[in-house]
Image (spheres, grey):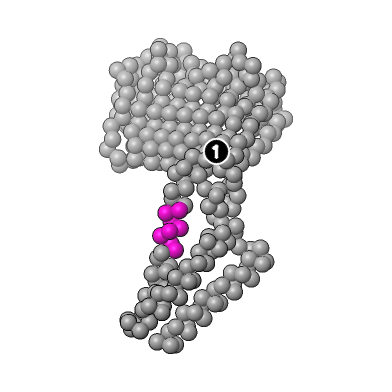
């Protein structure tokens, strides 16, 4: 029993010294360092359990260690999980990127973490119709990093990427849900790509010149409103992109004048798609609007929802 006690406390001593040395050298991620600091009082709990159990059970010291680790892990999980579901308003960031009138195509690339996102197409009459504007509201450890590049062919790329202090190991204070609202201009053709880790996405693109659209959400629902627009840089039957929700629903609203083809990927969910009478459900899991041969504007996308419902609606 004495050897067991000496071994456990010796291992704890080595672990603490190693952590302190790594911390001094600055190689411990901030989130892990913060978690260890918060967990240090558990050493007192371990000491108390050791005194309580060592003479009562053959492996009392080992049981005390396991119980302490389980307690720390459980409390940590509850703390981070509960914080992750809360909407944070600790930090606010305004976004404003002017777009020149000579830009022929604007590529917008948006990457978010645990954030609810709303992308809006501004009408041409808006005072901000020649700029990308918006606002991010979230926790103090999160921010939106932007990069704007104009290429030699007259096109431009705007990248907006959400970053979190501490990376994959954030501080507890940095955990929480954010909100991003982004207003897109209508004076320039757009190629939009949106990738989200966790959070619903609402893309109201009814007023923009949408050339291509790719949306991927790991967790959350996606709702997209398509514009009454015929992509100028693609053939009528070209695949213009993919809208994918790995664990949520996908809803697409299409103007009645637009001829649309949607190739569905429902995985093995068995959930039937929802669509209006103005669409045909074809062999091969394809939804196609009945005006496909008479329409003057066409779109074709892949819709993927292996765990949720795919819904296509027709707008007047």
Residue reaching furthest right? Answer: 152
Q: Which of 50 and 262 is in front in this view?
A: 50
User: Relative to 146, does residue 72 appear above or below in the rendering?
Assistant: below
User: Relative to 297, does residue 266 appear above or below in the rendering?
Assistant: below
Residue 3 % position (x, y): 44, 87
Label 1: which secondary element = loop
* Quadrant assignment, res 190: top right
* Quadrant assignment, res 263: top left
Segment colored magenta: 72-79
**Would residue 50 be visible to someone looking at this image?**
yes
Residue 125 inside the magenta-drawn segment: no
Residue 76 inside the magenta-drawn segment: yes
In which quadrant is the N terminus drawn?
bottom left
**Magenta segment, principal secondary structure?**
helix
Q: In this view, does 302 lie to the left or right of 161?
A: left
Please tell me which residue is depicted at 64% across the width and 20% down the height of the picture: 128
**Would residue 110 be visible to someone looking at this image?**
no
């Amino acid at each position: 029993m004495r050897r067991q006690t000496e071994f456990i406390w010796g291992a704890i001593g080595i672990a603490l010294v190693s952590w302190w040395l790594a911390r001094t050298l600055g190689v411990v991620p901030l989130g892990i360092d913060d978690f260890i600091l918060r967990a240090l009082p558990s050493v007192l709990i371990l000491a108390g359990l050791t005194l309580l159990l060592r003479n009562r059970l053959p492996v009392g010291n080992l049981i005390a260690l396991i119980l302490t680790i389980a307690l720390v892990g459980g409390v940590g999980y509850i703390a981070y999980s509960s914080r992750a579901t809360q909407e944070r308003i600790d930090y606010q960031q305004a976004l404003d990127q002017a777009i020149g009138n000579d830009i022929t195509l604007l590529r917008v690339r948006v990457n978010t973490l645990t954030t609810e996102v709303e992308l809006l197409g501004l009408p041409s009459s808006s005072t901000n119709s020649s700029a990308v504007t918006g606002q991010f509201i979230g926790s103090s450890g999160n921010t939106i990093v932007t990069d704007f590049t104009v290429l030699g062919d007259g096109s431009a790329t705007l990248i907006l990427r959400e970053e979190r202090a501490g990376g994959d190991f954030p501080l507890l204070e940095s955990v929480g849900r954010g909100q991003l609202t982004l207003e897109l201009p209508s004076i320039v053709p757009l190629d939009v790509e949106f990738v989200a880790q966790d959070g619903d996405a609402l893309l109201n693109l009814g007023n923009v010149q949408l050339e291509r659209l790719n949306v991927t959400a790991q967790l959350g629902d996606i709702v997209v409103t398509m514009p009454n627009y015929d992509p100028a840089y693609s053939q009528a039957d070209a695949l213009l992109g993919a809208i994918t929700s790995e664990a949520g629903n996908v809803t697409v609203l299409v103007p009645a004048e637009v001829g649309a083809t949607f190739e569905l990927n429902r995985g093995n969910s068995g959930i039937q798609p929802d669509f209006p009478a103005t669409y045909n459900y074809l062999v091969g899991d394809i939804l196609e609007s009945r005006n496909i041969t008479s329409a003057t504007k066409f779109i074709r996308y892949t819709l993927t929802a292996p765990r949720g419902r795919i819904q296509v609606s027709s707008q007047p």
